[in-house]
Amino acid sequence: MGKNVLVIEDEPNIIEAISFILSRDGWSVATHSNGHDAVGVVQEAMPDLVILDVMLPGKTGYDILRELRSEDATQGLPVLMLTAKGQVKDREMAERAGASRFMTKPFSNAEVLNAVRELVAG
Amino acid sequence: MGTLNILVGVCLIYVVFLFLIAFAAERAALEGKGGWLRSPLIYTLSLSIYCTAWTFYGAVGYAARSGLEYLTIYIGPSLVMIGWWWLLRKLVRIGRSQRITSIADLISSRYGKSNLLAVGVTVLAVIGTTPYIALQLQSVTVSFDVFSSSYGAELTEAAQGSNALLVAAGLTLFTIVFGTRNLDVNERHHGVVMAVAVEAIVKLFALLAVGIFVVWGLGGGVSETLARIDASEIGQWQMRGDRWATLIFLSGAAFLCLPRMFQVMVVENEAEDHLRTASWAFPAYLMIMSLFVVPIAVVGLDLMPAGSNPDFFVLTVPLATGNDALAMLSFLGGFSSATSMVIVAALALSTMVSNHIVMPIWLSTQSVGASVSGDVRHVVLLSRRISIGAVVFLGYLYFRLSGGGTALASIGLISFAGVAQFLPVLIGGIFWRGATRTGAFVGLTVGFVIWAYTLLLPSFGAGTLVSATMLAEGPMGLGWLRPQAFFGITGMDPLVHAVFWSILLNTMSFFIASLVGFPSPLERLQGAQFVNVFEHSSTPQSWAGSLAQTEDLMVMAQRIIGAREAQNLFEREAKRQGMSGLLPEPSPDFLQRLERELAGSVGAATAHAMIGQIVGGASVSVEDLMAVADETAQMMEYSSKLEAKSEEQARTARQLRQANEKLTLISEQKDSFLSQVSHELRTPMTSIRAFSEILRDSDRLSEDEKIKYSSIIHDEALRLTRLLDDLLDLSVLESGRVNLNMQSGSLKGILDHAVASALTGAGADKMRVMRNATSEDITLHTDLDRLSQVFINLIGNAQKYCDASAPNLRIDVGRSNGALVVDFIDNGRGIPKAEQAVIFEKFSRTGEQKVKGAGLGLAICREIMTRLEGAVEYLPGQGGAAFRVTLPEEVALAAQ
């Protein structure tokens, strides 16, 4: 069972927080901070899990997710979506785009850790 | 005295009989059963009101005095009926198609509906007719007197007067009852016409009876009587050409122009082809009337003592020979002649007086709109009734004041000459399109003045109204203006003289004035309608028409009030009339009701015109057209109001839709704003929460890590505060509740402060700011803090986003269109064209997100500049990013 997590997020402080939490738990964490080439980065790294922000410069998290789901290689890849927009329609959009799990910022660290563990194990 | 009482009784019975006849005729007409009323015979007989008491009694007297000249009075009308029937037909057609009510109406209608002209004609007609009515009253009283004196009972003058008054009152009553029962659209009075026709028979019968009695009872047979005539002076032909010609012309003209003749001939006419019958039947009637005049005169002169009045031979000869019954019949004949004339004359004149004098005055005293309300009918009827009373009373008054003397005897011809003045205007009006109102007015005036001057005034005798000197030497010694010898032509018979000059000058002035002036459009239109009446109107049919017309009416009514309504209406009417079918007879009563029904939908004038078109065959008169146009205009106004209203509604709907769209947009903007605010708030809160949990939960953190993470928490907390500050600031600015703190200060000072405030922290030294101190030397009066906020924002943006390796910012101060402009231009890549449009929107950030910021800065700048009545905009094409701040002229106090 792999322990590679790719975090796609544009807020440096949030990247740092997630990296710290996951590293401490033994995950190896890679990060990426814009939407343009996110799909390519995922396909190249082929992590065990992607943590994906919605509001990214260049391309939205929804678009990235839809592209990933349309590819055979990344079709079943666990994706945990994070968004700062906490409305019901955002959750629906995430589900339709194919998110494995959806979380609203701000999150609790334990929550993220549990989600990551479950998704990778599941 | 017994016979006298019988006479009174017979008279009363006769009057009651007349009332009954008239009443029966009215009833029959009302029930639509009066087909026999519309016989040409009745029409012909009604024309006999031409033969008044003056003719009945006076013809014998005339013959006794002047021989055969009396015949001219009969020849004139006979010639008109036989030779001029085409003119009569035209008159009748015009009368029907234009719904003419009197000769005054005809003349005024023809000449552009001039009421002045109508008033003139009415007044002249009243002047001309009043003595004539007086003459009739006189004949009744005198004949009564003759009757009674033969029984030795001389009547006092007072008794004569009261007799006359009684007769006048009775005639007034009759005329009011049968002349103003209702306001028939066609002004037809079946009761009156019927009574007049019956009286015509009575007077003819009476005269024939007396004549037969005289020839066979007294004269000893035809040959005997003829021999007597040959022996008498009367039998001699003493024809004076000029007098005969004048009298024939005069009686013919009067036959056409007398108001009462016009009434029976044109107004009461039921059908045009009745004229065909009348054109031979009426001359025949006149011939029979004149047949025994000479024998009676000759025998009377032989029989009666010298000095007895030949005017009453018709009465006195039977009386003298003891034939009371015949005398009574003769009296009834004279009575009939007198009463029928008075009745019809009063009817005709009252129509004229009421329509052209009373009603216009009444209407002018009413507020606008009274003419269209329903109670006008009652006013019209009342004014007619009063007019009838007035006309008859005027005749009575004349009779009393003139003393009933011989002055009345000559009135007949004088009256004829007076109304003959209408002739040129009448004939010209229906045959000459060039005839104008002015011409008619001038002609009538000239004619009547000359008539009055040469005939009427002198007729009262020298010294009464015209002095003997004036008669002999002319007014003020002007010999050529002598009333009975114009232009020094003496030796003419006064009547011939008067008729010749008055008609000649009347005609000439009428023609000349018509040729000189120009007719108004309405006159031209009416002129064409009158002159070309046969082209304008279809062959007229009787007003009460056939069932075929009812079908037409039905079709029309269905179109206007709807099929079911129309059917119900017609069925109801048929039932009311007792008809078995579904279609009623088009009786006047029904037509009136139908017209009212239709008027409710299309207006009174239109309804009248439409029914008239179908039933009356009448062409639409100008008045109708104007009324229709008026109604149409009202409808158009109404529909344009509706149109405007619906347009207004459409506009309101559009405005509502726009407002709704705006609201939707605002709501969407609000949602999107809230969503963005939520995002901007959650992002720093995420970091804060994550790192505070790390600090709390991890006990193995290094000191450096602790410091680093708590600094992040600190910075993100500041970021949150800034964001909230910006949001509040924007909210205040946008709501317009911002209080501006107006101060004066130098531009240079503000820029110094802004540059110092903006360029702090990391990289502040790298940015080089280029300024021009001279151009900045301007004193401003505005909210300096707010302006400074804008400058700080712009300078800060330049520092944050300028990606040049050696970033610099140029601040230029200048003028553009009088306004003060401050440009901030950096040497970076600038903002892509697509994003230039959105950078001032809230939460818009461009390009790669290297720098933290909620994206509210430029939105706030824009709001501030709007409040300061200036502007901030992106300045494209400057190489790098360039923003221009524009300040209104008055902000710059002084440029030193």
Image (spheres, coloured by chain):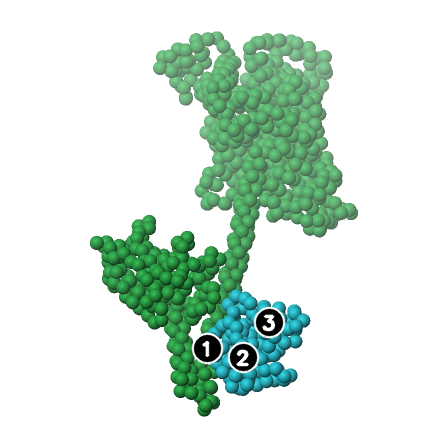
Q: Nearer the viewer, residue B671 or B391?
A: B671
**Mark 3 touches mark 2? (CB < 8 Å):** no
First along the sequence among labels 3 and 2: 2
Under mark 2, the amino acid is: Val
Q: Residue at x 56, y 21 (%)?
A: B432
The mark lying in front, picked from 1 and 2, is 2
First along the sequence among labels 1 and 3: 1
Residue B253 appears left or right of B555: left
Q: Say which chain tag 1 marks.
A: A
Label 3: state its secondary structure: helix
Q: Quadrant of the N terminus of chain A?
A: bottom right
Under mark 3, the amino acid is: Glu
Do the residues indicated by labels 3 and 2 lie within the same chain of the protein? yes
Do the residues indicated by labels 1 and 2 lie within the same chain of the protein? yes
Q: Which residue is mark 2?
A: A29
Real-space Cα separation, disc 1 to disc 2, in angstroms: 15 Å
Q: Colour of chain A?
A: cyan
**Mark 1 touches mark 2? (CB < 8 Å):** no
Q: Which residue is mark 1?
A: A13
Residue B786: name its quadrant: bottom left
Q: Nearer the viewer, residue B626 or B495?
A: B626
Real-space Cα separation, disc 1 to disc 3, in angstroms: 25 Å
For residue B679, which numbered disc appears in the image? none
The mark lying in front, picked from 1 and 3, is 3
Q: Which residue is mark 3?
A: A44
Real-space Cα separation, disc 3 to disc 2, in angstroms: 15 Å
Find residue B9 and report its horizontal and vertical position in percent.
Answer: 63, 37
Residue situated furthest bottom in the rendering: B699
Is residue B771 in view?
Answer: yes
